[in-house]
Image (cartoon, rainbow, N blue to C red):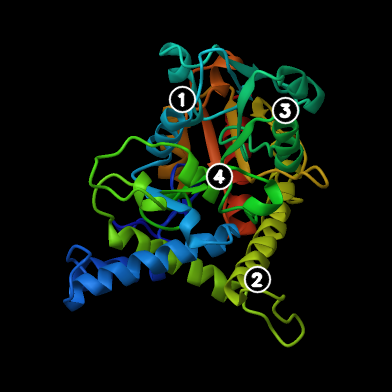
Amino acid sequence: MLAKDATGHARVFLDNGAGTLVNRRAADREARARIAWSANTGNPFPESKGAEATIVEGRQAVADFLHAGTSQAIISGESATSLLFHLSYAIGRTLTGNEKIVTTAYEHHANVGPWAELVKTRRAREVRYADFNLDTGYLDLQLFSDLVDQHTKVVTVTAASNFLGTHSDLEELGTIAHDAGALFVVDAVHDVCHRPTDVQDIGADALVFSGYKLFSRHGSFLYLRPELIESLTPYKVDPAPNHGPERWEWGTRDQAMLAAIAGVVDYLSWLGAPTAKTPAKPGSPRLARVRKAMEAVEAYEAGISRLLLEGDGKWLGLLDIPGLTLYGPKEVPKGIGRDPTFSFKLAGYEDQPLSRILYERYGLAVGAEDYFSCVPAIYGIETAMRATFVHYNTKADASTLLRALNELAAKKR
């Protein structure tokens, strides 16, 4: 379904930030689990045992993808929003009402509401928001650090802004959090499909992502440091387990959701399969291969980002198209990088009509909304166009977008 949509309409899919296309392995695994292993767990017959094995396999796949160390650190749930609320409620039970939470001004609302709720219910004193540079889209780490003090209980940040494409310096932010004795929580929903996500390298105490942003189906996953899985007290029904990730999970697990994400991780393992010239690194073969795949994805997408920003030799890049306002990084910074997410306005066009024009005239599926991001209000706008590329997009796709925007801009001169 890369070249055509379900109706047979040829198109380039660039709305990946709202949900990627589903990988075939994920769909096949989900269908088999949905049909073959449909029984509840805990029984001796094959349908039940198959469901149990599928759940275990899915947890391990996510653990390998995140370098979590153990599948017992992986909690599944309905959405990133629900999992972050679940986590915030559990942390809130440990607070006195005097604590602070520090986050950024470029968060998705899924990583704002759960923490603001603690202030509303007087379990925490305030949420502090670190500003970002309106031109570059990046945080000032010193200013961020100044917001964190001995009263800070949680530092929670997005790995990458879903509006700007900005990368957060997770390792440095994690150090700031831990030096203050705070928990470090990462919203990786927008970022997991673009580069390696390693909770050990990051030093994350908790990290959440969604399957449908990683070539799978809806449903989300929370890494929670094993000590916190046991020491925090989540809301649960009495008969639910008292230990392990199951104590955090409400209701019967959806084995098909876990089957689907295992299919994606196996696809990434295949994508990063070692050759004779590049043997697998020590440790879990799947873990090493997934890491290799995501490193290659990041490098490939950086090339697409540069083409979009600078132009392809025939068409002007996003930085130079007359009347186009680009929000976020104007380059691919060495070291910290950026995601291939480009939010923009084009003078003379309203967002929704422009989205329709791009699809009907050029076969480009490009979003036009606020993306549940805190960022539009900061720039004084309600919505913007957003094109998000992933590794199945090509440089030809990028050139098609540039051609469309160059031609449409020329009509308004």
Q: Amino acid at mark 3?
A: Ala
- Lower position in the chain sequence, tag 1 or tag 4: 1
Query: Is residue 15 visible to us here?
Result: no
The secondary element bearing badge 4 is classed as strand
CB of mark 3 within 8 Å of CB of mark 2? no
Question: x and y percent of residue 111 in the render?
Answer: 50, 30
Q: CA distance from mark 1 to mark 2?
A: 37 Å
Q: Residues within 10 Å of mark 3 (few under 14, many from 20)?
A: some
Tag 4: residue type? Thr
Name the foreground residue: 187 vs 152.
152
Q: Which mark is residue 288?
A: 2
Please state which amino acid type lies under the numbered disc 1. Gly
Q: Residue at x 48, y 14 (%)?
A: 119
The secondary element bearing badge 3 is classed as: loop
**Which disc is residue 180 wearing?**
3
Of pointers 3 and 2, the one earlier in the residue sequence: 3
As measured in the structure, the alpha-carbon distance from the residue carrying label 3 to the one carrying label 4 is 35 Å
Location of residue 370 in the rendering, given as x and y in whole percent from the top left corner? 47, 26
What quarter of the picture does the N terminus occupy? bottom left
Q: Is residue 3 shown left or right of residue 306?
A: left
Q: Kindly report the distance in space between the C-alpha atoms of the residues bearing marks 1 and 4.
A: 35 Å
Residue that badge 4 annotates: 388
